[in-house]
Image (cartoon, rainbow, N blue to C red):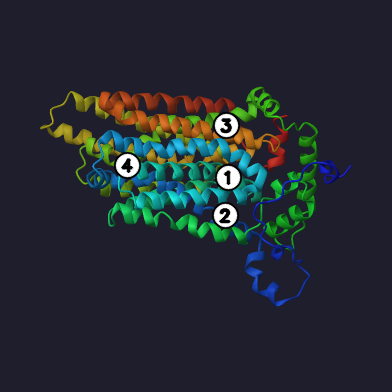
């Protein structure tokens, strides 16, 4: 029985965005279009082009995360908000992202990866417009919620799309572009926030998704999603353009088809059946969820959302400039990860990253404990402020070297096609739920005890070392189908 026959009688869902037939042209055809599109048809360039276009989504994600740091004092002053109201504003993006995360998997399964990115872009644009024209807290809050919903969908869909289109020897690096784009978005928000009003900054936030929407019409849909939907002709055409028109894709096509048939034999669209499969398969399915939860429990969002406050607490007067510097360091370190992940492997980078985070947070917590018992007029107090800053910077570098990018890469690699929508939604929801909890409790914990707060984060990162060592598999150099077969 053929792969296509397996799907007969089912209600085949069509992709929400169909980019036409430009990528169906064979390599032997001779036409003016062929010569003008030669750069696109090259193996690496075509994949890179797709990744660069969808990377606009994570840039939007990062811009949303970084927006609250440089705009806090101006928004509070102009709209007459209290500190608690601004804290609610900062956390509402997480609430919206949780709703988006719940919907993200099913949206991506029913209308395709590109269609879900289109849907995510629209509330992002509306949200930024609502913030830019806000006269009171109601429009401000509504805009933040809409942004969060779009970001929640983007945070699941982009890494999955990149994993499904990438060759096995490039998948880690290209997957890490997701987190690199997030850090670029955060840095853009920090830098632009130094020079423009918060309303203008909100208007600038529209541009990533405004460019993303037309860009989606020029890239192919995920071949693995098309294969799952039974669209054999579109699936092979999409894979051909991603690998190059002169490349023999027969082996990869057959492997995807065989894996698809095996998954469909056990496929049951009933939510309860899929949930049971997820719960009884800790070995692979829960690894992705665990890594995404531990990523947020490290306290990284407490540093990023409230970076200026933390620098001030560390005794640094020019906190905004220091925050921009932190953003630059994060981009550089994440860029290094993008280069290393397919060479060193996922496990090694995760262990090195979480070990560095543990040592850095230990230094920060010790510095803050000592500051509590040291006179502010003493020279030692100033030295402790510098030490705490060094620890924070080292923690961000260590986070960016592995824990920042790789959990999203592994999540997109190990989830099997028949439960990817539901399991991916659960993993993304868990990530945003913990992120929301960290964001909401950061100010409270820091006011209780700065040293105690970083001690809690230190224990979490120490456990991450154990978790990675015992349970996280190495996925470097393996196809998605090989990875998923290993968990049967």
Look at the numbered disc 2 and give the secondary structure of its residue: helix
| x and y, in percent, of residue 401 in the image | 46, 42
Distance from the alpha carbon under mark 1 to that under mark 4? 30 Å
Marks 1 and 4, the one that precedes in the sequence: 4
Tell me the crowding category of disc 1: few under 14, some 14 to 19, or many 20 or more residues within 10 angstroms, Cα based: many
| x and y, in percent, of residue 152 in the image | 51, 41
74 relative position to 226: left or right: left
Residue at 41 percent of width and 23 percent of height: 459
- Dot 4 corresponds to which residue? 137
Instruction: Tell whether label 1 touches label 2 (CB within 8 Å).
Output: no
Marks 2 and 1, the one that precedes in the sequence: 2
Residue at 21 percent of width and 46 percent of height: 318
- Dot 2 corresponds to which residue? 51
Which quadrant of the view contains residue 1? Answer: top right
- Dot 1 corresponds to which residue? 157
Marks 2 and 3, the one that precedes in the sequence: 2
Marks 4 and 2, the one that precedes in the sequence: 2
Instruction: Specify the farthest residue to the right.
Output: 1
Instruction: Specify the farthest residue to the left.
Output: 377
* Foreground disc of the pair 2, 1: 1
Which quadrant of the view contains residue 303? Answer: top left
Instruction: Tell whether label 4 touches label 3 (CB within 8 Å).
Output: no
- Dot 3 corresponds to which residue? 426
């Amino acid at each position: 029985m053929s792969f296509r026959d397996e799907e007969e009688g089912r209600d085949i869902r069509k992709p929400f965005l169909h980019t036409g037939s430009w990528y169906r042209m064979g390599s032997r055809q001779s036409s003016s279009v062929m010569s003008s599109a030669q750069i696109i048809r090259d193996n690496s360039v075509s994949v890179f082009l797709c990744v660069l276009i969808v990377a606009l989504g994570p840039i939007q994600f990062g811009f949303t995360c970084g927006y609250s740091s440089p705009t806090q004092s101006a928004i509070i002053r102009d709209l007459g908000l209290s500190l608690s109201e601004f804290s609610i504003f900062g956390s509402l993006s997480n609430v919206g992202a949780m709703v988006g995360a719940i919907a993200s998997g099913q949206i991506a399964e029913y209308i395709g990866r590109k269609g879900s990115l289109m849907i995510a872009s629209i509330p992002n644009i509306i949200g930024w417009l609502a913030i830019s024209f806000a006269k009171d807290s109601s429009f401000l809050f509504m805009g933040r919620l809409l942004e969060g919903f779009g970001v929640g969908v983007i945070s699941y869909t982009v890494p999955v799309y990149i994993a499904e289109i990438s060759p096995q020897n490039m998948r880690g690096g290209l997957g890490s572009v997701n987190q690199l784009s997030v850090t670029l978005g955060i840095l853009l928000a920090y830098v632009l926030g130094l020079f423009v009003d918060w309303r203008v900054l909100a208007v600038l936030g529209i541009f990533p998704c405004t460019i993303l929407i037309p860009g989606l019409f020029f890239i192919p849909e995920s071949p693995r999603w098309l294969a799952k939907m039974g669209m054999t002709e579109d699936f092979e055409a999409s894979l051909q353009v991603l690998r190059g028109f002169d490349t023999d894709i027969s082996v990869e096509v057959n492997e995807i088809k065989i894996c698809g048939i095996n998954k469909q034999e056990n496929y049951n669209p009933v939510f309860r059946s899929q949930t049971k499969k997820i719960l009884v398969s800790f070995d692979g399915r829960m690894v992705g969820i665990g890594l995404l939860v531990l990523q947020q429990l490290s306290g990284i969002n407490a540093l990023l959302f409230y970076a200026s406050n933390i620098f001030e607490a560390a005794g640094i007067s020019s906190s905004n400039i220091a925050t921009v510097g932190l953003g630059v360091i994060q981009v550089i370190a994440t860029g290094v990860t993008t280069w290393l992940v397919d060479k060193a492997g996922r496990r090694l980078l995760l262990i090195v990253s979480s070990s560095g985070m543990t040592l850095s947070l230990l230094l920060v917590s010790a510095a803050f404990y000592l500051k509590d018992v040291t006179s502010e007029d003493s020279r030692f107090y100033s030295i402790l402020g510098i030490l705490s800053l060094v620890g924070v910077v080292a923690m961000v570098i260590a986070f960016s070297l592995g824990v920042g990018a790789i959990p999203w890469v592994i999540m997109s690699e190990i989830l099997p096609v028949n439960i990817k929508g539901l399991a991916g939604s659960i993993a993304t929801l868990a990530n945003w739920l913990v992120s929301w909890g960290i964001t909401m409790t950061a100010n409270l914990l820091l006011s209780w005890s700065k040293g105690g707060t970083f001690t809690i984060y230190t224990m979490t990162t120490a456990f991450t070392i154990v978790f990675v060592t015992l349970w996280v598999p190495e996925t470097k150099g393996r196809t998605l189908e090989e990875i998923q077969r290993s968990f049967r």
